[in-house]
Amino acid sequence: MDRSAYASMSAQEQDHWWFVARRTIIDSLVRAHVPLPSKARILEAGCGTGGNLSLLAQYGALDAMEYDADARGHASARALCRVEAGALPDAIGFGDARYDLIALLDVLEHIDADTASLKALGARLAPNGRLLLTVPAAPWLWSDHDELHHHKRRYTHAGLLDVIRAAGLKVGVSGYFNSLLFPLAVAQRMAHQLLGRDAPLDARPSPLVNAALQRVFAAERHLLGRVSFPIGLSLYAILSA
């Protein structure tokens, strides 16, 4: 990503509504669908500036890898786990360690070799291990936000399932999320396109708006697995080898 994107992420991911609510969603998915042993080993592949490390460390012994040196520095400074240089698909690191949970959270869209990356991570799962994956959805929503974050693509649900199956992995549960706010996001992007500019979606709103958006987004944790959303800003999948 651009240096400015990393700086913005590091500054905002502790209290910005999107990051906070997404962690709530991730926690709900893990607790509902990932059978973790008592001494679980966890890997975050592509940890960015480390905003998810405190959550993931609650589940077991955590390792993290990150390609970008600046982001890796931010993540290491949190002193929550070992953070090593790495890259997908060929340099995951940590020797031949196998993991009970691998988190790949809004990373796959940055990588040219998405199928090969999922296959490589699948090979690092322990018996009965799970890979938790999130990606941005709806290719027709492509915007300057995607360009700033150096995305290669956004996914449809069917397209993501094709990549997963081509990697030889099995899908446990999958679907869209960040769906309740989807109409608002579409309206915002259309308005800014008409004005000839694209507002950054990660700009910090007022405290009241931030709290309201967080509550709405986080409320989806009660619906995932019970309601199949037809569309959303993001997709999730929990995979096994």
Image (cartoon, grey):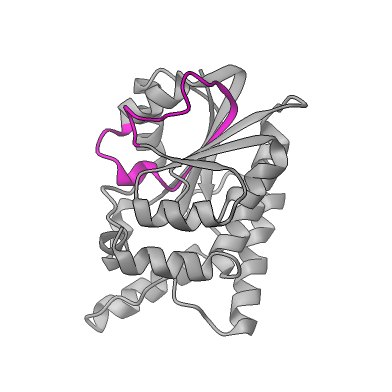
Q: Quadrant of residue 100?
A: top right
**191 vs 148, nearest the viewer:** 148
35 on left or right of 52 = right
Give percent across and percent down for residue 111: 29, 41
Q: Position of residue 178 (x, y in %)?
A: 53, 57
Residue plotted at (40% across, 17% down): 168
Q: Report the label total.
A: 0
Would residue 9 be found to the left or right of residue 16 on screen?
A: left
Q: Where's residue 229, x and y in %?
A: 55, 48
Magenta stretch bounds: 87-114
Depicted 180 relative to depicted 189: above or below: above
Judging depth in this view, the residue of 182 and 119 nearest the camera is 119
Q: Is residue 112 magenta?
A: yes
Residue at (29%, 56%) from the top-left corner?
Answer: 140
Extreme-right residue of the structure: 38
Tell me the quarter of the image containing the N terminus.
bottom left
Q: Quadrant of residue 233?
A: bottom left
The prevailing secondary structure element of the residues shown in magenta is loop
Closer to us: 148 or 91: 91
Query: Could you tell me if residue 210 is visible in this image?
Result: yes
101 vs 71: above or below: above
Residue at 62% x, 54% y is 23
Res. 56 image quadrant: top right
Name, please, the residue furthest toward the top: 127
Above or below, 181 against 175 in this view is below
Q: Position of residue 70 (x, y in %)?
A: 37, 57
Q: Residue furthest left?
A: 196
Query: Is the residue 42 above or below the residue 9 in the image?
Result: above
Q: Decide if residue 155 is in sight here.
A: no
